[in-house]
Amino acid sequence: MSSWGKYKPNESGKNSWSQEEAFEKLTTFCAYQERCPWEIRRKLYDKGISDEPAERLIAELIAAEFVNEERYARAFARGKFRLKKWGRNRIRMELKMREVSEELIRKGLSEIDPEEYYDTLLTQAEKKWENTHESDTYKKKFKVTQYLMNKGFEMDLIKDAIESLISDQS
């Protein structure tokens, strides 16, 4: 439970769930969007259910196909890339934080088409370049690079994208 950091459970007792109520609520929670066991554990902990009862509920959800970590990793990678324009490094880090295995992270990242990925990186670089008001080209490159690294793109691809951006403008 140490991976939860400063996360505190609901200690007041109100809004806590019974074991039966928990399964019903969790099926709705999982049907709404893909979830991983880490997210479910966190939700259960907040509702006063932890340890063995929580693990039993998670096992039931997995058996009933409400939870599937591979499906989750693939959907997470696709969604964060397409909607939030995150790079592979950011997606990998977020999945690791959710305790998804390295093998499943690789499967999730395989959902991202390399051509679409580079096109997205170029588009993000162009937008940031145009919106960065800096007369010194070196400082401007640094700011755009920092922005793209924070989004999770790889340094070698960022360099290529910025160089092609600058050469197109010359």
Image: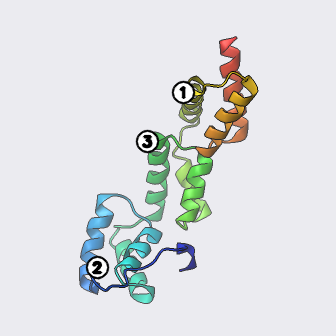
Q: Earlier in the sequence, mark 2 or mark 3?
A: 2
Residue 134 visible in the current orientation: yes
Residue 7 appears left or right of 97: left
Q: What secondary structure is found at the residue carrying circle 2? A: helix
Q: What secondary structure is found at the residue carrying circle 3? A: helix
Q: Disc 1 marks which residue?
A: 127
Label 2, label 3: how far apart the Cα atoms are:
31 Å
> In terms of depth relative to the viewer, which is nearer, 144 or 81?
144
Label 1, label 3: how far apart the Cα atoms are:
16 Å
Residue 104 visible in the current orientation: no
Displayed quadrant of residue 37? bottom left
Residue 106 appears left or right of 55: right
In the rendered image, the residue lying farthest to the right is 138
Q: Disc 3 marks which residue?
A: 83
Query: Mark 1 and mark 2 in contact (Cβ < 8 Å)?
Result: no
Q: Where is residue 65 in the image (x, y as percent from the top left)?
A: 35, 68
Displayed quadrant of residue 143? top right
Question: Which residue appears at 43% of the width and 75% of the height?
Answer: 41
> In terms of depth relative to the viewer, which is nearer, 9 or 167?
9
Q: Disc 2 marks which residue?
A: 22
Label 2, label 1: how far apart the Cα atoms are:
45 Å
Residue 93 position (above or below residue 9): above
- Amino acid identity at mark 3: Leu
Q: Where is residue 161 in the image (x, y as percent from the top left)?
A: 66, 28
In the rendered image, the residue lying farthest to the bottom is 52
Residue 52 position (above or below residue 143): below
